[in-house]
Amino acid sequence: MHDIDVFEYAPTADKYRLERKHRPVKQLGSHQVRVAVKAVSLNYRDHIALHNLARRQVGGRIPCSDGAGVVAEVGAGVTRWKVGDRVMGSFFATWKEGPFQMAHHQHDLGGTVDGMLGSFVTLDESALVATPGYLSDLEASTLPCAALTAYHALFVRGGLSAGQTVLCLGTGGVSVFALQFAAAAGAQVLITSSSDEKLARAIELGATHTINYRSHAEWQKVVHELTAHRGVDHVVEVGGPGTFDRSMQSVSAGGHIALIGVLTGFGPPTGSLFPLVARNIRLNGIYVGSQEMFNEMNQFLASHQLYPVIDGVFPYDQSPQAFEWLASGHHFGKVVIDLSATH
């Protein structure tokens, strides 16, 4: 192996484009692991980076936090892994356990440091998590960000229990994982979409009620009707400022909002925040999770034999088209890039 095939963020006038390049192979450090990447999945964060929506400098960086593969080589001091082990990268390479620390932002794959969109990646041995044996690499590649974010939101910070109600906004990666997790835990799930076809698929995955937000612009009123005017116990809020006001109106007194996404932008909420106080609502900001949570989630997945929902699989050389499909918003669940042919 003389070089590594990667995609990089290449700067343009006001955003980035994906540029395919070859990088020389570097000697492994004592505790480093070289992984042959088999699959990568996309998150909305990758769209944000590509289009420079957060004004973050990622020029020359390898995209994508989420990938799964096989250990191809280990450094002399590596004890956790051996060649042939199936592994996934951790979104925050240094967040092992405990509360989040701001220093972890300096080690986020596909952002501050190189991500997973290449034939091989090199990571510290402590930045990897074992792939659940019953999942394929394509399926496992969807877990590090979207799945872990949903798990963190519902179970670690939310304390979800059987019989409670959960509202999921849309049918992207985080929301579909939240639907699957909540249904498996015995919760009732309400989910929104502008597509009746997507809502029908959500019912198949265990949704109790569906709401077409194009037909029902005031969807928070439908939520109250469906919950006997009580509201839901949990809202998985991925929209941001454009949906947050209605999410506050949808949650029950003493309920929980997991604030996750910025699909509607980075601006402030459009309405008053006073309902948070008046109704004693818990509001938690969720940014993925630790490796400890990751391993707990994998046990939950295996115990319930849950399979990630993959909308489409693109070959590696069509990575730009995969980003375009994600940007279109037409997907249901996850968009995956297959790198198996690169080895």
Image (cartoon, rainbow, N blue to C red):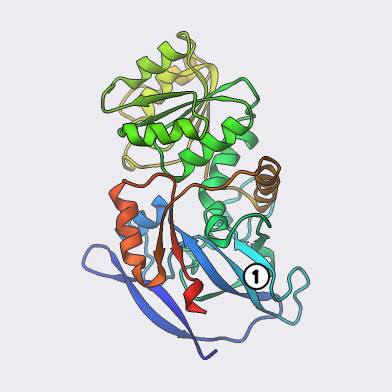
Say whether residue 266 is left or right of residue 343. left
Say whether residue 240 is left or right of residue 294. left
The residue shown at (39%, 51%) is 44
**Nearest to the observer: residue 68 or residue 62:** 68
Q: Quadrant of the N terminus?
A: bottom right
Q: Secondary structure at mark 1?
A: strand
The residue shown at (53%, 69%) is 38
- In the displayed orientation, state which residue is furthest to the bottom: 2
Q: Position of residue 141 (x, y in %)?
A: 54, 58
Q: Is residue 327 above or below residue 201?
A: below
Disc 1 packing (10 Å; few <14; some 14–19; many ≥20)? some
Q: Which corner quadrant of the image does residue 9 belong to?
A: bottom left
The residue shown at (42%, 36%) is 201
**Residue flagged by tag 1: what amino acid is it?**
Asp
Q: Is residue 109 above or below residue 34?
A: above
Q: Position of residue 191 (x, y in %)?
A: 43, 29
Q: Which corner quadrant of the image does residue 214 belong to?
A: top left
Q: How many marks?
A: 1
Answer whether residue 226 is visible to the viewer in this image. yes
Q: Is residue 309 above or below residue 248?
A: below
The residue at which mark 1 appears reads as 124
The residue shown at (47%, 63%) is 110
Say whether residue 54 is left or right of residue 65. left
Q: Position of residue 279 (x, y in %)?
A: 50, 14
Say whether residue 40 is left or right of residue 83. left
**Nearest to the observer: residue 43 or residue 163:** 163
- In the displayed orientation, state which residue is furthest to the left: 13
Answer whether residue 274 is visible to the viewer in this image. no
Q: Is residue 105 above or below residue 124?
A: above
- In the displayed orientation, state which residue is furthest to the top: 228
Q: Position of residue 69 (x, y in %)?
A: 59, 68
